[in-house]
Image (cartoon, helix red, strand yellow):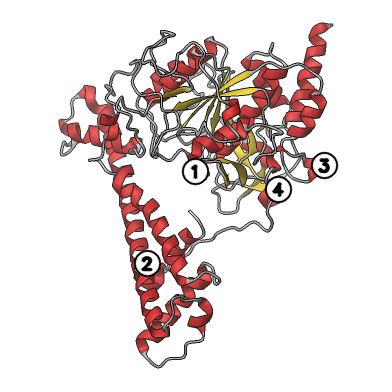
Amino acid sequence: MRKLMCLALCVGLVFSGVAQTSVVTVPANEPPKNWFNLDPVADQVNGVSTEKAYELLSGRTTQTVVVAVIDSGIDIEHEDLKGVVWINKDEIPGNGIDDDNNGYVDDIYGWNFLGGKDGRNIDFETLEITRLYRELKKKFDGVSAENVADEDKDQFAMWTDIKEEFEAEAGEALNQFSIYDGITRAVTRYNKLFEAYLDTDEVTYQKISQINSKDAIIDVSKRHMMVIFEATDESMPLSALVEALEVDMEQLAEPAKYSFNVDFNPRDIVGDDPDKLDEVGYGNNDVIGLETDNFHGTHVAGIIAASRGNGLGMDGVANNVQIMALRAVPSGDERDKDVANAIRYAVDNGAQIINMSFGKSFSPNRQYVSEAIAYAAEKGVLLVHAAGNSAENIDEEANFPNDKFGEENNWDHWIEVGASSWGAEDEYIGNFSNFGRKSVDLFAPGVAIYSTAPENNYQEAQGTSMASPVVAGVAAMLLSYFPELTPDQVKDVMMRSVRRIKRLKVVEPGSQGKVVNFSKLSVSGGIVNAYEAAKLAMSLELDSQK
């Protein structure tokens, strides 16, 4: 959340008597809104040299590349996206018939695996650990280890681990909500108190700081509010702070209401059989995801493909590209069934690249997902995946889906992406980004990325979710200009052409200040660069013609 999320920790001692601290790193300066497309040398930001690449490729013919975006839904009517949306030309809109016999009725722009036939959509979902806890509890709750059958011992061991982790995380989420709820209620009361005491409609830092009262309640309330103002924004009226706290409260309520709620199960909306993994045709064709939060997917799609040169908002990385919209990621953890079937849909319907800006710590049906990944490999489709935002080494920590299903634990058609930042030194890498010398292939811009938002808006967001589509966009550019490249060749070109800086030191994400070589945080040791990738692809093309 915003700076206000720090408030619950920074001033928790005022209301609960518990001393807590939180450190928020605020960038010293802001980058240009299009920084991820800019050049490190010419523009002095760690972009991927997109514009420089197009200058190099000027005059060459291109082919249209279809990029599937498996995400939360995409506003395909956005002014900067509607011209780049994939259209299934073999399907007749609105006739209620599966014209192309692919198993999906009226799939004009893609498919929504989280929708019901009645038009409803799943918005919130539980976490995968909650679903596992719910199922395993039915079997093992109250059962002692000595009474477990031999064939159930592995599953019982999983139950023991999941029970401990789930109950700890659920308890922490509820505790945080309780603390924040107390703060919100207190600030609301203070606002009413000072409105009456000062006889004003707008309580401000300046007005409270000038109070000189011998009333003990007013004096204590003043001191508490001074702490709060100084921890947030001294220019913000107290009524605006209350409104902001209420918005944050809605987000903090989600874990209690949805994420960790074992009694919450929205899957009835879809009406499928969750245990029938290879089911075809469930869902609906609402790829926007009406009445749900489709910001994430819309933002991702814009990074890849927002129309270039139209004078609107921003430019995506790729030109001559079409976005196939696949909705499979709710607010909560996606289901393995939906992920695998979305991959298969994309492959079967002509996608050449699939962007996957999502992930989770548990994957009960990961074999089914791995089979879909292998299917994509057989059909020559490149998969690009966000490494995750837990500031963890995913050589050691679980993050699904991943490419560890390959014979050598490294699919040739899979690119795992970490998030870099625009500046130097401490601003070179996203402090939230997962990393891994064996598991993360390369880094790409993922901090303060300005892109499309629903209803013709534009907004900044950050995460490996934003870095992955930058890489997908560069891959689409390469395939558009060099259509003869195979997925493994595209990956090889991008890996070999990354921008590396010798002996660059960065703070390892999540390490509390541990300084490491940036080159040790990924397989390639660098940041994707469109210009260098295009230059290498051109040289390989010339070599093949000799």
Q: Residue at x 43, y 35 (%)?
A: 360
Residue lying at the far right of the rendered structure: 546
Residue 437 visible in the shown view: no
The front one of 429 and 314 is: 314
Q: Where is mark 2, residue-wise?
A: 183
Q: Residues within 10 Å of mark 1 (few under 14, many from 20)?
A: some
Give the left or right position of residue 217, taking residue 438 as reference.
left
The front one of 88 and 463 is: 88
Q: CA distance from mark 1 to mark 3?
A: 33 Å
Q: Where is mark 1, residue-wise?
A: 390
The image position of residue 338, as x and y in percent, is 39, 24
Q: Nearer the viewer, mark 1 or mark 3?
A: 3
The front one of 281 and 332 is: 281
Q: Where is mark 4, residue-wise?
A: 32
- Could you say whether the residue bearing mark 1 is in a helix, strand or loop? loop
Give the left or right position of residue 494, taking residue 391 as reference.
right
- Could you say whether the residue bearing mark 4 is in a helix, strand or loop? loop
The image position of residue 382, as x and y in percent, is 58, 19
Q: CA distance from mark 1 to mark 2?
A: 27 Å
